[in-house]
Amino acid sequence: KNEVEQSPQNLTAQEGEFITINCSYSVGISALHWLQQHPGGGIVSLFMLSSGKKKHGRLIATINIQEKHSSLHITASHPRDSAVYICAVSPNMDSNYQLIWGAGTKLIIKP
Amino acid sequence: DVKVTQSSRYLVKRTGEKVFLECVQDMDHENMFWYRQDPGLGLRLIYFSYDVKMKEKGDIPEGYSVSREKKERFSLILESASTNQTSMYLCASSLMKGKRNTIYFGEGSWLTVV
């Protein structure tokens, strides 16, 4: 079993829909990261959180440390949100420079 | 704006060639990483470095080596390229270990070995 599991693997939705992507992990962590990868390769960090909730524009990330679960929400989705969304965790250890990566969720927003 | 720059976006190399992938960051970060990304396998760590001249193996170091002579530059070397090293390679950097830090990625280098 992977230590970081994302669901769904693939998601197709219509423009304007509310999107939720989930991430569950099985290790103790110091932080959880959400990243976005557009076709063509580059990866951009969206959020890093260790508790509660963060919001940036139409993106909201939440984390429940007790349940070892995080969600990424996109409100009023738009075709430009189409990308792969990746969850990664920084495990609790002396040096947290190694991240454990989820497999990613491929999101397609249709106009 | 923070920046991680990878020297080549697309490369085609022949089997057996020595390949250099260069990465430069302008954020004075201590940590630098090389990942490869393959369909269905996600990101896999090849090597990382937490200081100049320091390196540690990641999950899949076989067939690769790295060099970090200056803080801002981290090079990935394929000593003798093979077709199973055809992949996308991503360089990343972050602040020093022991802290919760955002990781910054380059745009990726698509390597095809023929």
Image (cartoon, helix red, strand yellow):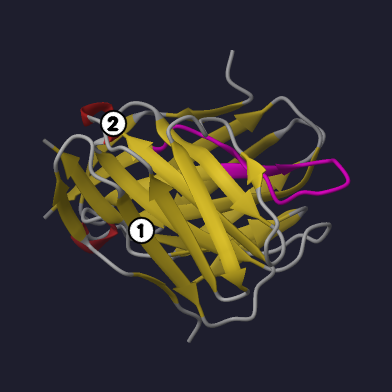
Q: Which mark is residue B39?
A: 2
Could you tell me residue A69's position as x and y percent?
Answer: 66, 35
Q: Residue furthest right?
A: A94
Q: Which mark is residue B21?
A: 1
Which chain is indicated by disc 2? Answer: B
Around disc 1, counting alpha carbons within 10 Å, would you say few (fewer than 14), some (14 to 19), or many (20 or more)?
A: many
Give the extent of the magenta segment: A88-104
Around disc 2, counting alpha carbons within 10 Å, would you say few (fewer than 14), some (14 to 19), or many (20 or more)?
A: few
Q: Amino acid at mark 2?
A: Pro
- B58, A110: nearer the viewer: B58
Q: Quadrant of residue A68?
A: top right
Could you tell me residue A106's position as x and y percent?
Answer: 30, 39
- B60, A27: nearer the viewer: B60
**Majority secondary structure in the magenta region:** loop
Q: Amino acid at mark 1?
A: Leu
SS at badge 1:
strand
Q: Residue furthest bottom?
A: B1
Could you tell me residue B50's position as x and y percent?
Answer: 71, 59
- A90, B50: nearer the viewer: B50
Could you tell me residue B46's position as x and y percent?
Answer: 51, 40
Which residue is depicted at the point 35% across and 58% down?
B21
Which residue is depicted at the point 60% across and 37% down?
B58
Which residue is depicted at the point 58% across and 54% down?
A61
